[in-house]
Each structure stands twice: as C-alpha cells, then as structure tokens.
Image: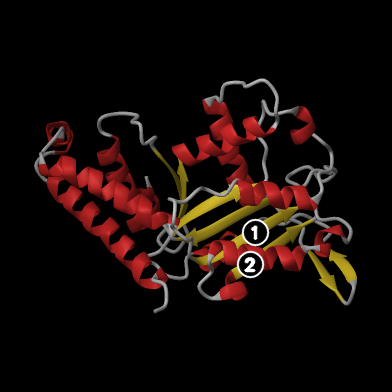
Amino acid sequence: MAEELRDAYPKNYLMTYAVTPFLAGDTALQHYNSLLSLGWMQRYSDMIGIFSNDSVMNIVTRQHGLTGAKATPVTLDNLNEYIANCIAGLVLPVTPVRSANGKLEYKATPAPCDIWSMISDMTPMPSCKLTSFSSSTVVSGVAASKRTAAVIGWDDLRTNMTRNMPSLLTGIKRRSISARIQARGVIGGEYWKKANSFETQLVSRLGLVHGVDCLNVQLSSIYGTDLKSSMRSLDLCYNGSDSIHMLESLTTKAQAMFDEKAYLHWYERYGGPEVMDTFDECFETLHSAKDAYEAFLEPPL
C-alpha cells in the first residue's frame, strides 16, 4: 500500500505506523513479515511510527498496577487505545497558544496539524525515519479517578508521559536525533510554571545529541475535536536509539530463519522465485538504516 500511494502521489508526504509482534511469538512467520513490511515502509514512507507490543503491554500493565486496585486483565483493546491516543494526540487539529511579553495569545479557530512540519522535524535524515512515542494517556479500566478527572495537573501529566516512555535494556542510555511534544488543553498560565525545568530534564532523558534545539514543543488550547473540553494531555514523539535494538533483533532473527530456508516455500508459492530478491533487498534496507542510526548517534569519544 505504501508503494502504491508513493507512486500515485510522488510529491506528497507519507506517514505510516507499525506495531512489532510480541517477542514471545505471534506466528512462526512474524520475523519474516516484520522484515518485509518494515523494509517496504522504510523505502516508501517519510516517517514511520513504531510501537512494540511488549512495550505497550508493559506500559498498560504498569498503569493498572499503580492504581492499587484489584488486578484486572489487560486487553487488546487497552493496547490499541493507548496506541491510538499516542497518534491522535500528535495529529488531531490544534488551536496554537503562545506566551508573548507575559501575555497569552490564542488562535481562535482550529487548524489542521502541520504534518509536514512534524515529518521534517522528526526525520531530518532520510535513512533515520523510525520514531517512538509516549503519552500521558491512562487507558480504560484503570481507576476512574486517575483517568476521567476533568482537569489533571501538568505535573501529573508530565510524570505520566515520562513514566510511559518505552523501557530500554539495562545499562543502555537513550540517544535521540529529535523530539516533539504536543500539549493539549493549555489554558491560562499554569503550563509554563515548570515547563523550562521539565524540558531540560527531558532533553537529558532523551539524550538529544543537539540539545534543546531539537526539542519542538507545540501547544494547543483544545484537547482534541471538542472545543469545549477541559481535558489535558501531553504526547511525545522522538527519533532515537530505541530503533537500533529493534532493527538488530528483527534482522538477526529473520536472517537466522532465512539462512536455514525455514518456511520460505510459503513465500515462493505466492510470490515466485523472485521473492528471494525481495528478502535480500529488505535485509539490505534495514541493515543500512541500523548503520545510519549507529553512525549518527554514536557517543562522542
């Protein structure tokens, strides 16, 4: 589909999203399918949002655990809800807010989110286009007092957003090319009271290689499509070293199966002998992406 859209609209931008399978295994073919899908998206998309089923499961499970209430099972709907909120928080219409000379200036009417601005901010290097997400969203099923309160303080939202960031392997420090925060429901001066200290902490936590200049903070007075809503949210998108481990794990597992010719007859049955060339192209594409990330994010000597 990405290839077809790129051919039909060569001058338009294309943002795609992918959910990686559980490490415990969804299907025997998951590493092949992930390789082929991500290889094609890397080739034809301008920006790719990556969600890990395992990471989202951990985030939602932790949200349930923090309530102190009786444990309830995490459902697929919970995972989809969290992912959908991460995306919606970044791309829904906005009414920009800015603070100028001590006064707040609001744009009266909603405007579409500037998707091209997001893509150009988040993927300044064509080979490094895999982005990760975090949201202050607390999913359904978690204590109502934590989710449905009309107004939640910005301190709590910032804590939720940083707590919901995907975990890294022990001993690994995150490094990032760029990041964007979308704050919604910014009315009055409360947001700015601790904004500078929070952004400084976030720059360090993300390991932004070019510092605060690569952190783009967008503010909107409306929460979503409801102009009268008093809800608030914080959503984070960042392009960083999370993708290196994901690419390495994916290509290593797929390569091990490919070398043993495991299950390849299913792909040859429907794609013919030339499908082997497609595998080779996708391996090369994702290896190149991993090399680009490592070269750009390599810690200074």
- The residue where tag 1 is placed is 181
Q: Residue furthest front?
A: 171
Q: In the image, residue 14 lies at what x, y percent? A: 46, 55
**Residue 41 appears left or right of 202:** left
Residue at 60% x, 45% y: name it. Answer: 164
- Identify the element where label 2 is drawn: strand
- The residue where tag 2 is placed is 216
- The three-letter amino acid code for the residue at tag 2 is Asn
- Sequence-wise, the earlier of marks 1 and 2 is 1
- Identify the element where label 1 is drawn: strand
Q: Is residue 277 above or below residue 292?
A: above
Q: In the image, residue 16 lies at what x, y percent? A: 46, 50
Label 2 crowd (10 A; few <14 / some 14-19 / many >=20): some
Residue at 84% x, 38% y: name it. Answer: 150
Q: How is the image coloured?
A: secondary structure
- The three-letter amino acid code for the residue at tag 1 is Ile
Residue at 27% x, 45% y: name it. Answer: 36
* Distance in Å between CA atoms under marks 1 and 2: 6 Å
Q: In the image, residue 130 lies at what x, y percent? A: 43, 56
Q: Is the C-beta separation of discs 1 and 2 under 8 Å? A: yes
Q: In the image, residue 278 lies at what x, y percent? A: 19, 49
